[in-house]
């Protein structure tokens, strides 16, 4: 959460910072700001509420002078969304400007001390405290590096910070805990960012800073020290395919990323052929396995629990919402923990993983972003190979997480999946019950009939229930329609009371085993006036005669969850657009949730 960027070099800093922030905007889009230092060493700041495009227009961010600067795109934690709370923040003298990602847990106590010493604060943020603390430490006679070292010791929490300290022509930084901070070096210039994506257009080799690092970069020097005495990490190559980062002709990233599913699914299937032996061996060694993840990654974990339990019949496998894991003291003695996270940055996942590792518990990561914190601290990893996902809603990465569990289970049917994706997203006209629509058109038709309704139910059994949960999350997240998912059999135990005329119900039916019951559920809801839509497979569709349905090409039911979610993603996408929302930037959310 929060994107931070820094540039120093021969070029004008502001336009570069804006481009870097554009690439980071998915980490937060409440407000945006830039600070640069002009040739006389004066720090100039421009900031405002809203998206980069909006603030750029209103405040002419790109006109700030100077070849050195820092920038920030905010997801609010401390303090409301306002211009005052937008970063960068400064000290009393205006000589220190700071951008920050993370939370300073003891900011209030330090703020009180600093207020007593006469410091004046202009925002409600925890960040501003850091600028004043450094000012105070400099006043005591410390050098900037000493002040940074002392700050890491005094400030509690996980944070990454980049700062300007006039008149020094250096980008200073410090990092404590789990949040990423990465340095990129070019010829006569240097970059700092909270996500390697922002460095990809400028440099190919980068340095991922360790916990406890502080130092500076100038045009031709990188200096890194570490509070805990950790050695300087080696530079790494950036492995991002920058050509796949843009919208590729689609109006929205979410839509494009859904259409990227066939490409990345087959990439993963090829990867899995050769690269997951170590992970499977690890899995086979342990009898008790816990799977943790948040949001969509939790839903993939649930799929993992269901499908792996079918395959490894003697193992006890359980999926748990990551933030609840620390509360499950009954599970502390676990043998193996599988941690699922697209970003590899989610605090709710990293926090327990860090503690488990300290206690010697092996952690198998299922992760998308290479070199993320989770990737680095895990015992073993499976990369889901889903490329960069920038829409806040997880789509192609959820699909590949599901495929990763199918691969860990040794499911041969994994190989059928890319072909099925090609069929539904590239070639096939869908059997939607209304003739020859494409899948996208069928999803749009369903979205048109529910986008103006306040609520919807998503129902399914077993693996279909996982798809229902994911579909409901997606439509809530991007279109703000209140959607709830239930195992279909639960409906009659309460929620059925909500069904009345035109209430939308999406019913997932994926297995011969459940289809008769699914038909009964369908009857139960339509007899009470609901608008029901069935998402099913070609071999089952005759059971839903008379219904409005989307029928998908048959695949082995163990991998069906990966296919079933595609129409659900498209329905959510179209509902958001029909309601006039930007599905790529849902309100109140950010892509990487790096706070607890
Ligand atoms: O990066 P992670 O997979 O750890 O993220 C976990 C959730 O925050 C994420 O899946 C979230 O639920 C998605 N935005 C849902 O579409």
Image (cartoon, rainbow, N blue to C red):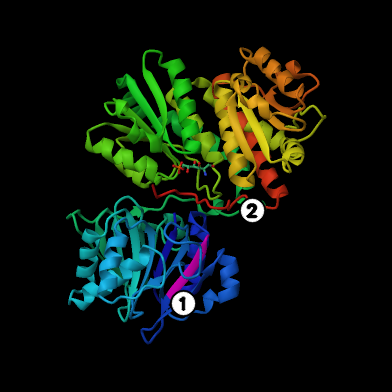
Question: Can you give x and y, in whole percent of width and height, for residue 134 in the image?
Answer: 27, 71
* Rendered image quadrant of residue 521: top right
**Residue sitting nearer the eye, 427 or 405:** 405
Question: Can you give x and y, in whole percent of width and height, for residue 216 in the image?
Answer: 28, 68
Q: Which portion, as a residue range, is magenta? A: 30-35
- Helix, strand or loop status at disc 1: loop
- Helix, strand or loop status at disc 2: loop
Is 162 on the left-hand or right-hand side of 532? left
Q: Is residue 32 magenta?
A: yes
Question: Can you give x and y, in whole percent of width and height, for residue 117 in the image?
Answer: 25, 75
- Magenta stretch secondary structure, dominant: strand
Residue at horizontal 42%, vertical 27%?
Answer: 319
**Residue sitting nearer the eye, 48 or 570:** 48
Residue at horizontal 33%, vertical 21%?
Answer: 288
* Rendered image quadrant of residue 331: top left
Query: In which quadrant will I find the N terminus?
Result: bottom left
Ligand 1 near label 2 (Cβ, under 8 Å)? no
For residue 12, the mark is 1
Q: Give the Cα separation between the discs numbered 2 and 1.
A: 31 Å
As drawn, the residue found furthest toward the right would be 435
Residue at horizontal 17%, vertical 55%?
Answer: 229
Q: Is residue 79 above or below residue 325?
A: below
Q: Is residue 53 visible?
A: yes
For disc 1, the neighbor class at 10 Å (few under 14, some 14 to 19, many from 20) is some
For residue 582, the mark is 2
Is 407 on the left-hand or right-hand side of 121? right
Residue at horizontal 72%, vertical 28%?
Answer: 533
């Amino acid at each position: 959460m929060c994107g931070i960027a820094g540039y120093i070099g021969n070029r004008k800093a502001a336009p570069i910072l804006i481009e870097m922030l554009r690439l980071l905007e998915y980490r937060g889009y409440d407000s945006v700001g830039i600070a640069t230092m002009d040739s006389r060493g004066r720090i100039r700041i421009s900031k405002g509420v809203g998206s980069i495009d909006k603030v750029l227009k209103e405040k002419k961010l790109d006109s700030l002078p100077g070849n050195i600067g820092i920038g920030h795109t905010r997801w609010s934690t401390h303090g409301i969304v306002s211009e005052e709370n937008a970063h960068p923040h400064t000290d009393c003298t205006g000589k220190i400007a700071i951008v920050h990602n993370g939370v300073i847990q003891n900011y209030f106590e330090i703020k009180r001390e600093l207020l007593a010493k006469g410091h004046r604060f202009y925002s409600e943020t925890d960040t501003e405290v850091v600028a004043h603390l450094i000012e105070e430490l400099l006043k005591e006679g410390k050098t900037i590096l000493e002040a940074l070292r002392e700050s890491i010791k005094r400030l509690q929490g996980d944070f990454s910070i980049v700062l300007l300290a006039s008149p020094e022509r250096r980008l200073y930084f410090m990092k404590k805990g789990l949040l990423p901070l990465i340095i990129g070096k070019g010829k006569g210039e240097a970059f700092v960012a909270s996500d390697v994506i922002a460095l990809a257009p400028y440099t190919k080799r980068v340095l991922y800073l360790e916990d406890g690092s502080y130092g500076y970069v100038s045009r031709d020097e990188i200096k890194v020290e570490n509070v805990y005495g950790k050695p300087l990490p080696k530079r790494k190559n950036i492995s991002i395919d920058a050509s796949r980062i843009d919208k590729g002709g689609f109006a929205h990233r979410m839509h494009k990323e859904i259409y990227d599913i066939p490409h990345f699914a087959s990439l993963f299937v090829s990867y899995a052929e050769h690269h997951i032996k170590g992970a499977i061996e690890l899995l086979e060694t342990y009898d008790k396995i816990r799977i943790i993840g948040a949001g969509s990654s939790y839903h993939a974990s649930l799929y993992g629990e269901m499908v792996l339990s079918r395959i490894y019949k003697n193992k006890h496998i359980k999926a748990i919402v990551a933030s609840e894991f620390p509360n499950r003291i009954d599970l502390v003695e676990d043998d193996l923990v599988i941690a699922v996270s697209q970003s590899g940055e989610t605090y709710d996942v990293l926090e327990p993983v860090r503690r488990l590792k300290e206690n010697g518990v092996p952690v198998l990561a299922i992760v998308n972003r290479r070199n993320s914190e989770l990737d680095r601290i895990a015992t073993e990893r499976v990369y889901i190979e889903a490329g960069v996902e920038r829409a806040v809603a997880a789509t192609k990465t959820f699909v590949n997480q599901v495929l990763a569990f199918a691969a860990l289970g040794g499911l041969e049917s994994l190989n059928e999946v890319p072909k099925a994706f090609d069929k539904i997203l590239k070639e096939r006209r869908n059997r939607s019950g209304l003739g020859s629509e494409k899948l996208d058109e069928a999803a749009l038709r369903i979205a048109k009939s529910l986008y103006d309704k306040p609520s919807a139910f998503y129902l399914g059994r077993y693996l279909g229930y996982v798809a229902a949960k994911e579909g409901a999350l997606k439509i809530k997240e991007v279109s703000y329609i209140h959607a709830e998912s239930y195992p279909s059999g639960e409906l009659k135990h309460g929620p059925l009371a909500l069904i009345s005329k035109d209430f939308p119900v999406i019913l997932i039916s994926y297995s011969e085993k459940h289809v008769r019951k699914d038909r009964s559920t369908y009857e139960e809801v339509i007899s009470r006036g609901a608008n029901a839509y069935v998402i099913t497979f070609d071999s089952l569709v005759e059971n839903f005669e008379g219904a409005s349905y989307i029928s998908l090409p048959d695949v082995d039911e163990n991998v069906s969850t990966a296919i079933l979610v595609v129409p659900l993603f498209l329905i959510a996408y179209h509902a958001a657009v029909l309601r006039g929302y930007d599905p790529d930037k849902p309100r109140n959310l950010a892509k990487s949730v790096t706070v607890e």
